[in-house]
Image (cartoon, rainbow, N blue to C red):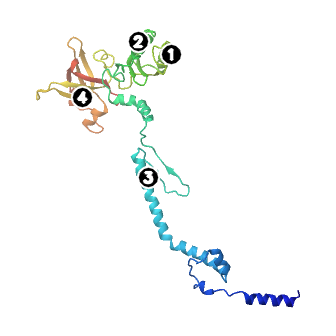
Amino acid sequence: MDLASAGRAAAQARLLTPPVDRSRFPRKPFGVCSRPLLPPPKLWFLSPHPERGVSLINRAKRRGSASQRPPLKRAIVEEEEEVDEERVIVAEEGLEVEFTDDLEEGMMSMPIVMEDDDDFEDELEENEFEEEEANLFVGDGGAGGGISLAGMWWDKEALAIAEEVSMSFDGDLKMYAFKTTANSTIRVRIEKISTKYGSPSIDDIEAFSKAYRSRLDEAELAERIPDNISLEVSSPGLERVVRIPDDLERFKDRPMYVKYISDGAASSSPQEGDGVFKLISYDMELCHCTWGLADVKINRQKAGKGRPLSKKQREWRLQTPFESLCLVRLHSDC
């Protein structure tokens, strides 16, 4: 077929092809984007300017994103509010969460105030010595001295072993306090009799601890005590309890905090008093002691800042029977 015949055939084919009904696809003004009636592929195929159509859609997306900026700001606020709600929820569970503003680094600080779990009990056990110092009383097994047993099946055996260990040091290291707890812990406070104030050295504490630990290991193998016993050995403490009347001679030169009961003449009921005193004298036959104000900071402040004790304070005296003394302990803040 020559070129002329091919041209005539193509022209005849165009005449036989029915025209496309353009009314079904009305053209929209430039800049307006609407949903096409036919699927997008057909729309792009029939569009007289397909590249303009693509450009129009892209531009419509950019305009749409610009027009949606206020809602985006609101969405950010809502997200921040949700974070605040999470902060409240976490705080109610026992955590205090602090969110930083450094969004670039994405850092978040979460200081834990308290965790409501079983591990917190271990922390309480570690701070028990501090609580004993604040709430001590005579015979509490801590700073107050004496023996305090938890009532476990093994604590009397542990006490007997501790007494035997104390005897092995020729009586120079004695138990000031002995305490057992329900979590299989033994706390021992020892004092050294040969020193003026009964304070043991670090070497003394280490020697007693090693000797006692060795005996406890033997008892564990013999199943006389449980095999998970923990041991803590320490000194009596700076503000140890003064045993009346046994320790009066030893600590007569030290300021003491004294809590006592007095029979007030103005009141029919006994009154409780306290103060930081120095021991003036004591009588073992009459079973009473005489106190004066100690020259310490808490008493000097009553005379005025920067002033020494007044004459009236220096001459003040208090006489108490032994039995009226509720608590006597050393005072360390001079």
Question: Given contact means CB atoms under 8 Å apart, are the residues at marks 3 and 1 in contact?
Answer: no
Instruction: Read off the residue under disc 1.
Output: 217
Q: In terms of sequence position, does the residue under pointer 3 or pointer 2 come before the other?
A: 3
Q: In terms of sequence position, does the residue under pointer 2 or pointer 1 come before the other?
A: 2
- Give the total number of marks visible in the rendering: 4
Instruction: Read off the residue under disc 3.
Output: 86
Instruction: Read off the residue under disc 2.
Output: 160
Res. 334 in view: no
**Image coords of residue 22 (percent x, y):** 63, 86
Query: What whole-number distance in Å separates the C-alpha atoms at marks 4 and 2?
Result: 37 Å
The secondary element bearing badge 2 is classed as helix
**Image coords of residue 156 (percent x, y):** 39, 14
Q: What residue type is labelled 4?
A: Asp
| Crowding at mark 3 (Cα within 10 Å: few <14, some 14-19, many 20+) | few
Q: Which mark is nearer the camera, 4 or 1? A: 1
Instruction: Read off the residue under disc 4.
Output: 274
The residue drawn where x is 15% and y is 24% is 263
Q: In this view, does 76 lie to the left or right of 134?
A: right
Q: In this view, does 198 lie to the left or right of 243?
A: right
| Crowding at mark 1 (Cα within 10 Å: few <14, some 14-19, many 20+) | some
Q: In terms of sequence position, does the residue under pointer 4 or pointer 1 come before the other?
A: 1
Q: In terms of sequence position, does the residue under pointer 3 or pointer 4 come before the other?
A: 3
Query: What whole-number distance in Å separates the C-alpha atoms at marks 2 and 1?
Result: 14 Å
Q: In terms of sequence position, does the residue under pointer 3 or pointer 1 come before the other?
A: 3
Question: Given contact means CB atoms under 8 Å apart, are the residues at marks 4 and 2 in contact?
Answer: no
